[in-house]
Each structure stands twice: as C-alpha cells, then as structure tokens.
Image (tube, rainbow, N blue to C red):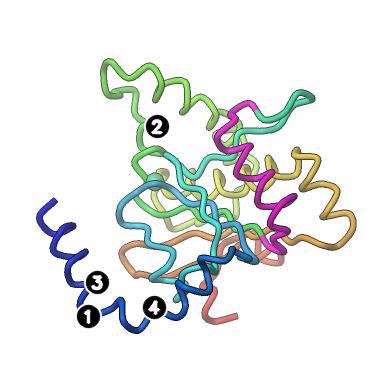
Amino acid sequence: MHKLLAGIRDFHHRVRPAYLERFAHLALGQSPDCLFIACADSRVVPNLFASTDPGDLFVLRNVGNMVPPCGSNGAIDDSAGAAIEFATISLGVRDIVVCGHSECGAMRAVLDTARPAGAPSLDRWLEYTAPSLSRLEGEPRLGPSLPALDRLSLAHVLQQVDHLRSYPAVAQRLEEGRLRLHAWWFDLANAQVLVFDSASGDFVPLAEL
Ligand SMILES: [Zn+2]
C-alpha cells in the first residue's frame, strides 16, 4: 500500500501536468476502439505492454480472463456480459482482444486438485474452464514445448474467443464486418505478446508479424 500511495503522489507532481489536457478532453466522454479482456493477475499490465494511453482501451479483467458464454437470456455471468454488451453496443468497439498469460494461477487451480478452501465463488467461477480442458485435447499444435499449465492457458484463450461469438451483439457485428476478435497471450518470462496464428495452429510473437 505504501508504494501505491507514493505512486499517487509521484503521479500528481511529476506525471499529471503532461496529462492534464488529455484528461480534460477525456472528461467529456470515452471512445475506445478496443475491448481488452485480461486476467486480473498483477503481472499482466495491458497499458504497459501495449503502450496504450488513457481512453484507448475498455478493459474487462477477471480471474482467468474468462468470457462465460451467452445463453438465450443473456450471459451466464452478468458482470462479463454487461462489459461485452456495453463495449459493443454503446461504445462500438471495432476489436475485442482476449489476452491470457503464462503461469496463470486460475489455470493452475484448474489443473491442481488442491484449491483454496472456503472459496465457493472461486470454485464456481473456475467451472467455466471445463470447455477449455476439452479444447486442449483438440489443439495438438498449441505450444508443443510449453508445460501443461501454459498449453491449457493457450487453449483457454481460444475457447473464450469462441464464447464471445455466442453474444448476439458480437455475432451480429462480426457478420456485418464491424468487429474483429483476437486471441493474445502474454509470455511473462520473456515480456512478450503472442498472437494466435491460424496457419500454424499455434501462438507466435505478435511483434514479428
Ligand atoms: Zn491469470
């Protein structure tokens, strides 16, 4: 907490002057062109590795960068569903990125039988990963040199992108060519963003494309 408070003071005195004009403009409204869905993990910092500024990204973060599928009565989880509907219908984003990452604790909890005790909400939340486990079996080309934990994380990202298509607002805009979906994965140890390459069936470094 000490670092957090010191950071706010540092922002106020050193960084804020350069951003005053931008925030005054942003106070009038937001028009991000991308919905960025990432894990709540403290090591995943989209604004840093994507070099984005305030106002650029509409961000949905939760444990395991989860996109619960949408049924006939809306999303299974209203928090994620509300963010997806607001970003597509109200903000009109042109792109949605689902970004997983290496060493993901949520994926580890799925693979491990030992989970934190007294966490019923977490247990229920992680049930949304069941299709990702099945997906991994059908994606043999994903991260062949990576440990099982990271291979599951890659398959999980692809599965969440598929779940996005179950939202009527997303499906309609995809059909009209007004929206694109992207599967990204942040390799923590190398501080590198990978993107799914359908030609190879694997994730490749985005910066090299
Ligand atoms: Zn994670």
Magenta region includes residue 164: no
- Quarter of image, res 160: top right
Residue 142, relative to residue 94: is it above or below?
above
Instruction: Give the percent coordinates (x, y) of residue 165.
Output: 75, 44
SS state under label 1:
helix
Q: Circle 2 sits on which residue?
A: 111
| Mark 2 or mark 1: whose residue is earlier in sequence | 1
Q: Residues within 10 Å of mark 3 (few under 14, many from 20)?
A: few
Residue 86, relative to residue 188: is it above or below?
above
Residue 14 is marked as 1
Circles 3, 1 touching at the beta carbon (< 8 Å): yes
| Mark 4 or mark 1: whose residue is earlier in sequence | 1
SS state under label 4:
helix
Q: Determine whether the beta carbon of the residue marked 4 sits less than 8 angstroms from the nearest atom of ligand 1.
A: no
Tag 4: amino acid: Leu
The residue at the point 30 percent across, 52 percent down is: 42
Where are the magenta residues, as a range?
76-95
Q: Nearer the viewer, residue 23 or 203?
A: 23
Q: Circle 3 sits on which residue?
A: 11
**Where, quadrant-wise, is the C terminus in this rendering?**
bottom right
SS state under label 3:
helix
Instruction: Give the percent coordinates (x, y) of residue 114.
Output: 29, 23
- Spatial CA distance of label 3 from label 4 is 11 Å
